[in-house]
Image (cartoon, grey):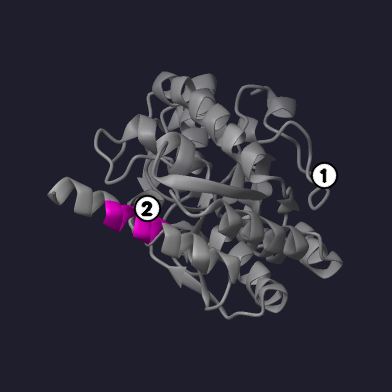
Amino acid sequence: MNAILRALAALAFAASLHAAAQGYPSKPLRVVVGFPAGGPIDIVARILGPKLSEVSGQQVIVDDRAGANGMIGADLVAKAAPDGYTMILISTGTAAINPHLYPRMPYDPQNDFAAVTLVTSTPELLVVHPSVPAKNVKELIALAKARPGEITIASTGSGGLPHLAQELLKQEAKVNLLHVPFNGAAPAVTNTVGGQVMGLIADLPVLQPHVLSGRLRALAIAAPKRSPLFPDLPTMGEQGLPHVQAVNWYGIVTTAKTPPEAIAKLNELFARTLNDPDIKQKLVARGADPIPGTPAEFAAFLKSEYNKWGPIAKASGAKVD
């Protein structure tokens, strides 16, 4: 009898979700960011927020839940009600790298989320404080070889793509850099600008204003080609390190078992937001290229990224601190 009652309750709950999805959205949308305010993912979320609110007719709340390289925010969404009102703007590190580096995770990255859409892609940038006597990667490598273990390079957190990019740099250049992880991009940038650490690898949007102002010096971009925002800045490959490539992406996922009707509507709302000319201009101006797509395309992409970064993470020797 108990099993029958539980089954009936589950059916009733599913029916209520599908009924609610017919009028979706009818209340505020919550976009979780797993990193501190002021970081690149937060920047993108706040660019999208007002337009997403306009096209949905609902308030959009950007909710920064920093910690554990994005896993605190992701866990919140994994355990949220599957109604499409709580989602997270995830990145490569949270979705495709963390699972290969952390022995225990509070959620199942493969089964606890429903893909909605890719949002943007952005390359990693290697920068140093102006006091560091290195104008390019070759000079930084020479400095690191002369002072092994003394050159401090920050990241936005252990296990993220910036951390992995640093491990690839250490491996290919055969140098001993001292990794200094921070809880997100904002504190990492603050400490690099202040000279507490010598350099940093992070997403382009959060570093762009500091490079343009001269507070940080850009040495290389970890992408297959140069950025139109910094056309004179060589890639890692151009400076003799072709395997040091790290292009981050951000995408929207919501809780698994969210009704397909709600996911389809949410995808439509993000597509309208990302295809808006003003939003496109704002994102591109910060070094983030809009790349919307379907839920099925993003689901396939998530699986391919998980499979791609697993061997790279293990081969890099990256360890979570």
Q: In the image, what residue type sits under mark 2?
A: Ala
Q: Which mark is residue 232?
A: 1
Rendered residue at 45%/47% (across/down): 113
Q: Upstream in the sequence, badge 2 or badge 1?
A: 2
Rendered residue at 31%/38% (across/down): 320
State the quadrant of the C terminus. top left
Position of residue 80 in the picture relative to residue 230 (left or right) = left
Instruction: Name the image quarter holding residue 299.
Output: top right
The residue sitting at the left extreme is: 1
Residue 252 is situated, as x and y percent measured from the top left of the image, at 57, 53
Query: How much space separates mark 2 and mark 1, taking CA atoms?
Result: 42 Å
Above or below, 213 against 221 in this view is below
Above or below, 37 against 218 in this view is below
Which residues fall within the magenta stretch?
A: 8-14
Instruction: Name the image quarter holding residue 15.
Output: bottom left
Residue 197 is situated, as x and y percent measured from the top left of the image, at 43, 53
Q: Which mark is residue 78?
A: 2
SS at circle 2: helix
Instruction: Name the image quarter holding residue 110.
Output: top left
